[in-house]
Image (spheres, rainbow, N blue to C red):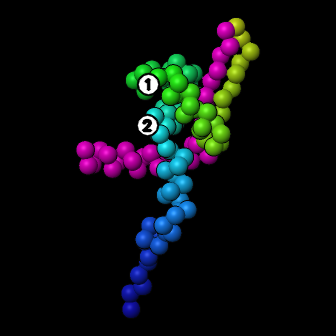
């Protein structure tokens, strides 16, 4: 007799499941791309904004604050003149690497 393994996506609750939570974390037009850029290493604000193709400073600032509040990245201010601010992923943020790899693979396959 064959034992069927249920697909976790099929048995996930409609609300409050991990997919919904992941989408809440990666919500917003630039959020996922900010995480993608920080997977390569810490970046300064201007570097991030340029790598993203120049979204407004307000939008990037909002996304960075949200990700910091969610524990996805850290913001380090270096006491220099002018002040240097560096953004880096936390361990929690680094754990999104596999999610973004899956998105990359899907996008490349179904482009």
Are the residues at dot 2 and dot 1 in contact (C-beta closer than 8 Å)?
A: yes
Label placed on residue 82: none
Q: Which residues are magenta?
A: 82-111
View extreme (top): residue: 81
35 and 69: which is toward the camera: 69
Residue 69 is drawn in which quadrant? top right
View extreme (right): residue: 79
Q: CA distance from mark 2 to mark 1?
A: 10 Å
**What is the x, y in percent for residue 67?**
59, 38
User: In this rendering, would 37 be left or right of 109?
Assistant: right
Q: Residues within 10 Å of mark 2 (few under 14, many from 20)?
A: few
Label placed on residue 29: 2
Q: Quarter holding the N terminus?
A: bottom left
User: In this rendering, would 99 be left or right of 65?
Assistant: left
**What is the x, y in percent for residue 47?**
50, 20
Residue picked out by circle 1: 55
**In the image, what residue occupies the spot 44% across and 24% down?**
55
**In the image, what residue occupies the spot 63% across and 43% down?**
70
Q: Is residue 97 magenta?
A: yes
């Amino acid at each position: 007799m064959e034992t069927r393994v249920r697909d976790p996506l099929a048995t996930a609750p409609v609300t409050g499941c991990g997919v919904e939570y992941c989408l809440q974390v990666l919500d917003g037009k630039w959020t996922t791309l900010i995480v993608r850029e920080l997977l390569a290493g810490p970046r300064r604000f201007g570097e991030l904004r340029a790598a993203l193709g120049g979204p407004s400073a307000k939008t990037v600032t909002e996304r960075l604050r949200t990700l910091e509040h969610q524990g996805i990245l850290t913001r380090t201010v270096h006491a220099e003149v002018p002040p240097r601010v560096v953004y880096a992923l936390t361990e929690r943020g680094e754990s999104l690497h596999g999610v973004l790899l899956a998105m990359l693979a899907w996008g490349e396959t179904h482009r």
